[in-house]
Image (cartoon, coloured by chain):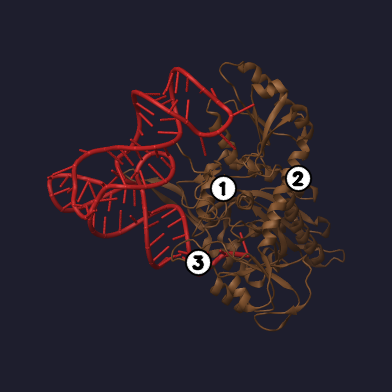
Amino acid sequence: MSKPSTAITPTRSENYAEWYQQVVRAADMAETSPVRGCMVIKPWGYAIWENMQSILDGMFKETGHQNAYFPLFIPLSFLEKEAEHVEGFAKECAVVTHHRLEATPDGRLVPAGELEEPLVVRPTSETIIGASFAKWIQSYRDLPLKINQWANVVRWEMRTRLFLRTAEFLWQEGHTAHATSEEAVEETMQMLDVYATFAEDSMAMPVIRGEKTEGERFPGAVHTYSIEAMMQDRKALQSGTSHFLGQNFSRAAQIQFLDEQGQQELAWTTSWGVSTRLVGGLIMTHADDDGLVLPPKLAPIHVVIIPIVHKADDPDAIMRYCNSIAAELSATRFDDRPIRVEVDDRDIRGGDKAWQWIKRGVPIRLEVGPRDMADDAVFMARRDKGLKEKSGVPRQQFIETITDLLQEIQDSIYARALEFRQAHTRTIDSKEEFYEFFTPEHREENKPVPAHGGFALTHFNGSVELEDQIAKDLAVTVRCIPTEMESEPGTCPFTGQPSPQRVVWAKSY
RNA sequence: CGGGGUGUAGCGCAGCUUGGUAGCGCGCUUGACUGGGGGUCAAGAGGUCGCAGGUUCAAAUCCUGUCACCCCGACCA
């Protein structure tokens, strides 16, 4: 039986969107559910999310945040308090209007008991958390108040994709209140930095930190910052956001405190979040045509050991050998945690077994049979390397170097992703070149657009209207105004006006 | 929300034009041979053909409606 040469069909270059879905399926991470736009996250996908949560949660605690939990339901009137905010979310809110079901004679259930005030299923929690903050905060001594919540939210999206955009998704939302604007801005930037560090160190996903333009700003925010990553189809993925909300939400929720002078003041607030969308980003940053490739720091399993047991040999001896290697590895640490090892002794064919782990993206695969046992060695394959690049390694050497090896894999996939981004990032100074950069060479009606373009760095001093026009022409938007990229003043290629610095343009998810 | 496409076994598909109550590959189960990259052979299990109506002696097939998913847009903090 001849199988395709890649584990995933179609390949990235053949049909990127379809490839993505096949990777999710082949790695057994998630599937669609009977509920429109909602996904079922399967154990392998959820384990990756749990690892993300665990690392992020530690970072939040280190920066002085505490976890709490607020209601899923938000009274309609709460949402109405901040005008811009309502407008931003109104179109995608799920609304609960009844609190009871009644059975009809023909056995159907119909909603009954209409609520006096409809409840909105939270699309985000600024307003409901604001109500609590207003109660909790009386004095400047109560500030800063730094809270985080791990929760699900619902945004009724028109078009959904597993992990990237679903009607319901899991996330964390941080909400803080401060006595001064400066302190709140500092918090906003600090959390952006936490996200960037997490993305780069833990996910091995290079990101650009920057501020959003007016058009892309969070409804009700004064400043919105984001981290932007380039996916392998060269589109940008907004992977985390951090908002400086000024006093807009404190005014709406009446979050007030008495300052040191006894003056009644409005608090300055922030909010920031990342979601299960990061899992999508992880896939589109590292996965290849054989499936998922996981950064060791997030891999649910670091090392899988596949015993090669021949009937004629002594299976128990092989198993003992494998288990002892597993035990030694488990006693070793990587990234401050014990190394996660699985001995896959399932009674299925070896080839199948190996492919399953390849598709799931496990960083290191060991095949251990009688020959290795005789040599006191292991046979090792790295997921970040070519399928054929396997080699025998003395057991002791393997165990002693495992931590370095995992870090090397972590570093190498980061380097590869960064290289990819750099290869598809262009500094552009003319409108013609800009339009050419973002126009695909081949384009068929109702077909996926082939990968083209990337990140374009141009000067820009244009208006929201001009940005809209470019979005209309090319489906390209300003992803962010980078906060840490060196850029000298220049001329905006669209308006001919002076511009203080370059911005990042891209098509986006 | 507009345009296009697709819904038939867990997955991928054929059958539909020319109605006669369902088939292929992979996967799954059992057994044997195997076993260092998706192996071979044999025997099995599995489907109210997305759903609801209609036409007909008879519907996967024709008609109407509806739902879901995918692609291209619009929209999307």
- Asked whether disc 2 touches disc 3, contact meaning CB atoms under 8 Å apart, the reply is no
Q: Residue at coordinates 76% horizontally, 63% vertically from top-left?
A: A267
Q: Amino acid at mark 1?
A: Asp
User: Which residue is the site of mark 3?
Assistant: A442
The subunit carrying tag 3 is A
* Label 1 CA crowd tier, 10 Å (few <14, some 14–19, many 20+): many
Tell me the tag on residue A58.
Answer: 2
Q: Which mark sits nearer the N-terminus, 2 or 1?
A: 2
Which residue is depicted at the point 75% across and 79% down?
A: A490
Distance between the alpha carbons at the discs numbered 1 and 3: 22 Å
Asked if residue A334 can be seen in this view, the reply is no
Residue type pointed to by label 3: His
Q: Which residue is mark 1?
A: A289
Q: Who's red, chain-wise?
A: B
Q: Secondary structure at mark 2?
A: helix
Please determine whether, in this image, residue A110 is positioned above or below residue A345. Answer: below
Can you tell which chain is drawn brown? A
